[in-house]
Image: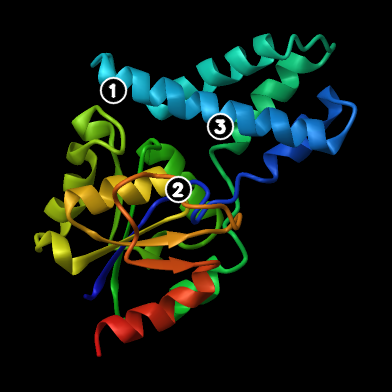
Amino acid sequence: MAVVVFDAYGTLFDLNGLADIARPLFDSQLAARAFCRRWRQLHLEFAWQAALVEQYRDFDQLAKQALDAAVAEHNLVHPHVDVIAADLLKSMQTLPVYPDVKPMLEELTTYRLAILSNGTLRALQASAVANDVLFSFDFILSVDPVRTYKPSRKAYALAQSAFGIEKRDILFVSSNSWDVAGAKAYGFRTCWCNRTKSPYLSPGQRPDYMIATLSELPAILSECIR
């Protein structure tokens, strides 16, 4: 198994810093973090709804709509709410990688690698360029061409088609349990990167491997190919 496909948001790219941008809107950092988690939840819910009703809007559009909804839900009244919202959306285009990403990529130079994400290609490429990891990947794949969202089988098929290999020869790595379950159902081998030490809640499809950080992934791959 010499092909590894990564999810982007929460797996490679770190969303936690968004709470620092939202902080002026709230009385505490804890409240800002809760707001950003809710924004993320709405973003995913809007994506899945768009996929189910077959009325596709790209992930950047949905990010703004979800942010507007989160602001309304929290009844935020602040003189700079529009400026801060714009800064949040702009930051989504150049998210930092987690500290474990670059060392991990340096250990996987003999593997073929890709990103498969619900994000737009421009956002994914911009974040990869900002972190100097663009050329670590053979492919950066957005769901835009198939106009649906993970965990649709059409989304995971993009990775199989790009590499032209059997499903079982791809290891899919994600920090999102629903994403792991979708990839497993499609036929990939899967690795859940449980960054938040959460219970695995997705029913029916258990990951093949579980790790706490991406630093553990090279050892997993060494075991796979023995």
Q: Position of residue 199 (x, y in %)?
A: 53, 52
Q: Where is mark 2, residue-wise?
A: 176
Q: Which residue lies furthest to the front in this view?
A: 204
Say which of marks 2 and 3 sits in front.
Answer: 2
- Residue 39 disc label: none
CA gap, disc 1 and disc 3: 17 Å
Q: Where is mark 3, residue-wise?
A: 40
Q: Position of 158 compared to 136: left or right?
A: left
Q: Earlier in the sequence, mark 1 or mark 3?
A: 3
Q: Tell me the kind of residue under disc 2.
A: Asn
Q: In which quarter of the image is the N terminus?
A: bottom left
* CB atoms of marks 2 and 1 within 8 Å: no
Q: In this view, does 200 lie above or below 222?
A: above
Q: Where is mark 1, residue-wise?
A: 51
Asked if residue 106 can be seen in this view, the reply is yes
Q: Is residue 174 above or below residue 43?
A: below
Q: Residue at x 77, y 39 (%)?
A: 20
CA gap, disc 2 and disc 1: 18 Å
Circle 1 sits in a helix, a strand or a loop, which is it? helix
Q: Tell me the kind of residue under disc 3.
A: Arg
Q: Earlier in the sequence, mark 2 or mark 1?
A: 1
